[in-house]
Amino acid sequence: MNTVAAGDAPEPSVTARPFRRILVAWDGSADSVMALRTAAALVGTGQGHVVALAVLSGHHSEVRAAGSSDLPAEARRVRTTFDTVRAAIDATLPVRIDLHTVEGRHVAGSLCEYAAERGFDLLVIGRHGEGSLMHPGLGHIAESAVRSCAIPVLLVSAS
Protein backbone atom coordinates (compact mmCIF):
# COMPACT_ATOMS: atom_id res chain seq x y z
CA MET A 1 0.00 0.00 0.00
CA ASN A 2 1.41 3.36 -1.02
CA THR A 3 0.77 6.31 1.23
CA VAL A 4 1.55 9.94 0.69
CA ALA A 5 2.13 12.32 3.57
CA ALA A 6 0.21 15.59 3.44
CA GLY A 7 3.33 17.60 2.67
CA ASP A 8 4.41 15.18 -0.08
CA ALA A 9 1.22 15.36 -2.15
CA PRO A 10 1.86 16.56 -5.69
CA GLU A 11 0.40 19.92 -6.66
CA PRO A 12 -2.59 19.54 -8.95
CA SER A 13 -1.96 20.87 -12.42
CA VAL A 14 -4.35 23.76 -12.89
CA THR A 15 -4.11 26.16 -15.77
CA ALA A 16 -5.72 29.49 -15.04
CA ARG A 17 -7.42 31.08 -18.01
CA PRO A 18 -9.74 34.03 -18.40
CA PHE A 19 -13.48 33.55 -18.61
CA ARG A 20 -14.47 34.36 -22.18
CA ARG A 21 -17.97 32.87 -22.41
CA ILE A 22 -20.11 33.65 -19.39
CA LEU A 23 -23.72 32.61 -18.87
CA VAL A 24 -25.87 34.71 -16.53
CA ALA A 25 -29.11 33.50 -14.96
CA TRP A 26 -31.56 36.27 -15.87
CA ASP A 27 -34.96 37.04 -14.35
CA GLY A 28 -34.78 40.83 -14.07
CA SER A 29 -34.31 40.82 -10.28
CA ALA A 30 -31.77 43.04 -8.53
CA ASP A 31 -29.50 40.03 -8.02
CA SER A 32 -29.65 39.09 -11.71
CA VAL A 33 -28.81 42.70 -12.61
CA MET A 34 -25.76 42.42 -10.35
CA ALA A 35 -24.90 39.07 -11.98
CA LEU A 36 -25.00 40.66 -15.44
CA ARG A 37 -22.84 43.60 -14.34
CA THR A 38 -20.37 41.21 -12.69
CA ALA A 39 -20.15 39.03 -15.80
CA ALA A 40 -19.54 42.08 -18.00
CA ALA A 41 -16.75 43.25 -15.69
CA LEU A 42 -15.15 39.78 -15.73
CA VAL A 43 -15.14 39.65 -19.52
CA GLY A 44 -13.91 43.24 -19.72
CA THR A 45 -13.04 44.75 -23.06
CA GLY A 46 -11.55 41.53 -24.44
CA GLN A 47 -13.02 39.10 -26.92
CA GLY A 48 -15.54 37.68 -24.46
CA HIS A 49 -19.27 37.15 -24.73
CA VAL A 50 -21.92 37.33 -22.01
CA VAL A 51 -25.29 35.62 -22.49
CA ALA A 52 -28.14 36.34 -20.10
CA LEU A 53 -30.45 33.31 -20.09
CA ALA A 54 -34.06 33.63 -18.99
CA VAL A 55 -35.74 30.32 -18.22
CA LEU A 56 -39.41 31.00 -18.83
CA SER A 57 -42.23 28.90 -17.48
CA GLY A 58 -45.07 27.84 -19.73
CA HIS A 59 -45.15 27.91 -23.50
CA HIS A 60 -43.00 30.76 -24.74
CA SER A 61 -41.35 29.21 -27.78
CA GLU A 62 -42.29 32.32 -29.74
CA VAL A 63 -40.09 34.47 -27.49
CA ARG A 64 -37.21 34.38 -29.97
CA ALA A 65 -38.28 37.57 -31.74
CA ALA A 66 -36.55 40.36 -29.84
CA GLY A 67 -38.75 43.33 -29.17
CA SER A 68 -41.90 41.75 -30.56
CA SER A 69 -45.06 43.41 -29.21
CA ASP A 70 -46.97 40.12 -29.09
CA LEU A 71 -44.67 38.55 -26.51
CA PRO A 72 -46.25 37.21 -23.32
CA ALA A 73 -46.06 39.59 -20.33
CA GLU A 74 -43.36 37.51 -18.62
CA ALA A 75 -41.13 37.57 -21.69
CA ARG A 76 -41.74 41.31 -22.27
CA ARG A 77 -40.75 42.11 -18.69
CA VAL A 78 -37.58 40.04 -19.00
CA ARG A 79 -36.68 41.72 -22.33
CA THR A 80 -37.45 45.26 -21.14
CA THR A 81 -35.40 44.93 -17.97
CA PHE A 82 -32.53 43.34 -19.88
CA ASP A 83 -32.49 46.11 -22.51
CA THR A 84 -32.35 48.79 -19.81
CA VAL A 85 -29.48 47.13 -17.95
CA ARG A 86 -27.56 46.33 -21.13
CA ALA A 87 -27.79 49.97 -22.23
CA ALA A 88 -26.35 51.10 -18.89
CA ILE A 89 -23.48 48.60 -19.17
CA ASP A 90 -22.82 49.54 -22.82
CA ALA A 91 -22.42 53.18 -21.78
CA THR A 92 -19.38 52.29 -19.68
CA LEU A 93 -17.99 48.99 -20.97
CA PRO A 94 -18.04 47.71 -24.56
CA VAL A 95 -18.99 44.07 -23.96
CA ARG A 96 -20.97 41.76 -26.23
CA ILE A 97 -24.11 40.89 -24.23
CA ASP A 98 -27.14 39.01 -25.52
CA LEU A 99 -30.40 37.76 -24.06
CA HIS A 100 -31.50 34.20 -24.81
CA THR A 101 -34.65 32.50 -23.57
CA VAL A 102 -35.63 28.88 -23.07
CA GLU A 103 -38.67 27.14 -21.66
CA GLY A 104 -38.24 25.07 -18.57
CA ARG A 105 -39.75 23.95 -15.33
CA HIS A 106 -36.42 23.20 -13.66
CA VAL A 107 -34.44 26.42 -13.81
CA ALA A 108 -31.14 25.15 -12.39
CA GLY A 109 -31.15 22.12 -14.67
CA SER A 110 -31.98 24.28 -17.69
CA LEU A 111 -29.15 26.69 -16.87
CA CYS A 112 -26.56 23.95 -16.34
CA GLU A 113 -27.62 22.03 -19.44
CA TYR A 114 -27.53 25.17 -21.59
CA ALA A 115 -24.08 26.09 -20.25
CA ALA A 116 -22.64 22.63 -20.87
CA GLU A 117 -24.14 22.22 -24.34
CA ARG A 118 -22.86 25.59 -25.53
CA GLY A 119 -19.39 25.59 -23.98
CA PHE A 120 -19.67 28.35 -21.39
CA ASP A 121 -16.74 28.89 -18.99
CA LEU A 122 -18.72 30.25 -16.03
CA LEU A 123 -22.29 30.60 -14.76
CA VAL A 124 -23.04 33.76 -12.77
CA ILE A 125 -26.26 33.62 -10.78
CA GLY A 126 -27.90 35.84 -8.20
CA ARG A 127 -28.43 34.38 -4.76
CA HIS A 128 -32.13 35.24 -4.86
CA GLY A 129 -34.38 36.18 -7.73
CA GLU A 130 -37.77 37.40 -8.73
CA GLY A 131 -39.48 34.41 -7.14
CA SER A 132 -43.03 35.69 -7.25
CA LEU A 133 -42.86 36.55 -10.94
CA MET A 134 -40.75 33.78 -12.42
CA HIS A 135 -40.16 30.76 -10.21
CA PRO A 136 -40.63 30.63 -6.46
CA GLY A 137 -37.51 30.67 -4.31
CA LEU A 138 -34.63 31.29 -6.70
CA GLY A 139 -32.38 30.82 -3.65
CA HIS A 140 -32.90 27.08 -3.93
CA ILE A 141 -32.27 27.32 -7.67
CA ALA A 142 -28.89 28.93 -7.02
CA GLU A 143 -28.05 26.16 -4.56
CA SER A 144 -29.12 23.48 -7.02
CA ALA A 145 -27.02 25.05 -9.79
CA VAL A 146 -23.96 25.11 -7.55
CA ARG A 147 -24.44 21.42 -6.79
CA SER A 148 -25.16 20.22 -10.32
CA CYS A 149 -23.31 22.40 -12.84
CA ALA A 150 -20.27 20.97 -14.58
CA ILE A 151 -18.75 24.46 -14.89
CA PRO A 152 -17.78 26.94 -12.16
CA VAL A 153 -20.66 28.90 -10.63
CA LEU A 154 -20.30 32.39 -9.15
CA LEU A 155 -23.04 33.56 -6.77
CA VAL A 156 -23.62 37.30 -6.42
CA SER A 157 -25.98 39.46 -4.43
CA ALA A 158 -27.20 43.00 -4.96
CA SER A 159 -27.33 43.65 -1.22
Image (tube, grey):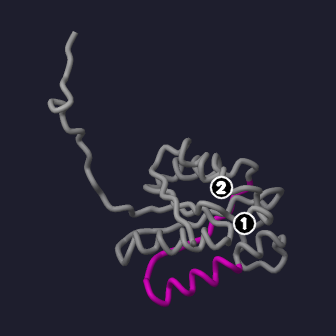
In the image, 22 versus 134, the foreground residue is: 134
Q: Mark 1 points at which residue?
A: 130
* Residue 18 percent coordinates (x, y): 33, 62
Most extreme residue toward the left is 8
Give SS at disc 1: loop
* Residue 89 percent coordinates (x, y): 51, 83
Most extreme residue toward the bottom is 91
Give the residue type at disc 1: Glu
Q: Cα distance, mark 2 to mark 1?
A: 10 Å
Q: Residue at x 77, y 78 (%)?
A: 68
Q: In this view, does 20 lie to the left or right of 115?
A: left
Magenta residues (range): 80-103
Q: In which quarter of the image is residue 79?
A: bottom right
Q: Name the residue under label 2.
A: 139
Q: Residue at x 47, y 69 (%)?
A: 39
Give the residue type at disc 2: Gly
